[in-house]
Image: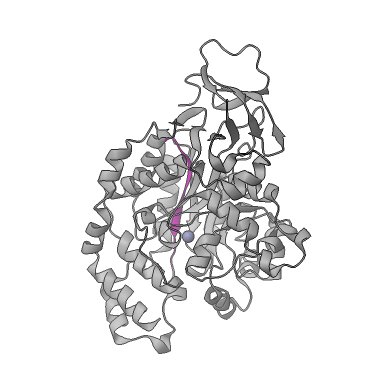
Amino acid sequence: MPGLQPILIKQAECVLTGEGQIGPADILIENGLISAIGEVKEPPRNAIVVSGRSRLVAPGLVNAHWHSPMQLSHGTSDRMNHKVFMWENQVDTANRSQEEIYVSATIGCLQMLKTGTTSTIDHFPEQGFGIEDVETVVRAFSDCGMRAVVALRIFDGEYSDILPPPERMTDALREALNTGNSLAPRPMQESLDLVREAIARCDGAAGRIRIFPAPSNPMRCSDALLVACQQIADTHDTGVHCHLLETRTQAQLAQALYGKTMLEHMDAIGAYSGRWSNAHCNWVSDSDIAIMAKHQAIAVFNPESNLKIGSGVPPIPRLLAAGVPCALGADGVSTNDNLIMHDAMQLAAILHRPSEPDRKRWVTADQTLAMGTTGGARAMLEPNLGLLKPGAKADLVLYDLDESWWTPLNDPLQQLIFGERGGSVRTVIVDGCILVDGGKALTIDEPAIIAAARDILKSVQKRNTGVRAVADAVAALE
Ligand SMILES: [Zn+2]
């Protein structure tokens, strides 16, 4: 798709490059890359011209932790803690058809694109999926034009962190798990074969879609599986994505299982490196942070999700101060209810302020934008993404400066982080292609996809009665 036609953004009023602010400026895009920025005197004659009048141009945002199968679960999970939400979520996402997988991913892409997010890591599903499911979600990203990593969520152990401790296990729950456990462990070899097949068939699809191995959570995986993920990543030059220390229970379980912290253990067995991106990191110890900094592994914070289900507060300033590369995610919409990365950026910047009296230690707007752009790009193994400069990948967003929250334009960066909520996005370009124009999605039939999505959740819930019994039994104990 890239390079069909050059694009000239003419006289943008302001450009946030990620390294500073310039403007008015022209931006020329050719072959999916930014070829010039500043004054473009002789653009190619066949260039599509996009007016930059009253427009702020900024790098496209990266949602570095998302779950496409959850995308139909808006408004389902209020006042649920992590355990209850996790099982409720199984009722909503297990046993999906191909069409349901496609629609769920596409409607999420629609929401992201229309609010300025151009790339995502989809931690894709967890329940016994097959190669056709992977191909379907890849097709969704390919059709709508987004840049994406499909991170295959695998595990070969129990979800012990979301089951009650053995002494509190009830007969009702034991019985329900025998028939409706959508999270029954899968043999390691089966998962690894599937990941390798998915990489062979789909990695690099459309020139912008990657496949990563992605342990659901290291403590739900054998050591052999974790080491194998690291080896697959080294062999195929992929990243590895996972949940990490989202809840206090997980930190306690790691100590009980390994006699050390989760990352001390992974480092000791050779299953950790700078290829890993770790969603949440709410309960990392100082030693975990030192290991992340040593390897330059990436922390992906999801502050909205953490607050909604009460799982913790990500220690963002501590990780930044230690030199850990940091990124942001929306997480699934059952624990967030939207995919607006402007919300995640604002919260990441202000979350820690009440507990940090020294204002000079507060996260800056610059750091926040970097988390929402280059940090996420790093988690996707995209070193050439997230800045607006010649030679960079052309993923960018034009915001309408005539909207009230941009008026007057006092400080574009601060207003992008603290004022914008995605409502002034007018044009979105990914890989040198215009995907949103005048606020309208060009690659997604919006009315059709919304109509297709309307009844899926009810239908999925109806078929997952066995899973419902597990969710109810867990909820009764929490
Ligand atoms: Zn997650």
Decide which of 109, 190 is in the foreground and name it. 109
Q: Is residue 94 in view from this perspective?
A: yes
Q: Is residue 179 left or right of residue 401?
A: left
* Total labels drawn: 0
Query: Which residue is at 66% across, 27% downward?
Result: 390
Q: Is residue 153 magenta?
A: yes
The vertical placement of 33 against 355, above or below, is: above
Q: How is the image coloured?
A: one colour
User: Is residue 468 shown in magenta?
Assistant: no
Q: Which residues are magenta?
A: 145-156
Q: Position of residue 364 (x, y in %)?
A: 71, 52
Q: Is residue 77 left or right of residue 280?
A: left
| Residue 373 vs residue 265, the one in the foreground | 373
Percent of width and height locating residue 225: 50, 62
Q: Nearer the viewer, residue 440 or 469?
A: 440
Residue for point 42% across, 89% down: 167
Q: Position of residue 457 (x, y in %)?
A: 27, 57
Rendering quarter of residue 188: bottom left
Q: Position of residue 398 (x, y in %)?
A: 54, 33
- Residue at horizontal 33 percent and vertical 59 percent from the top: 93
User: At 47% from the left edge and 74% from the top edge, which residue is drawn?
Assistant: 161
Quadrant for the N terminus in the image: top left
Considering every residue shown, the one lying at the far bottom of the view is: 167
Query: Is residue 225 in view?
Result: no
Q: Nearer the viewer, residue 149 or 55?
A: 55
Query: Is residue 291 left or right of 441 when viewed as pictured?
Result: right
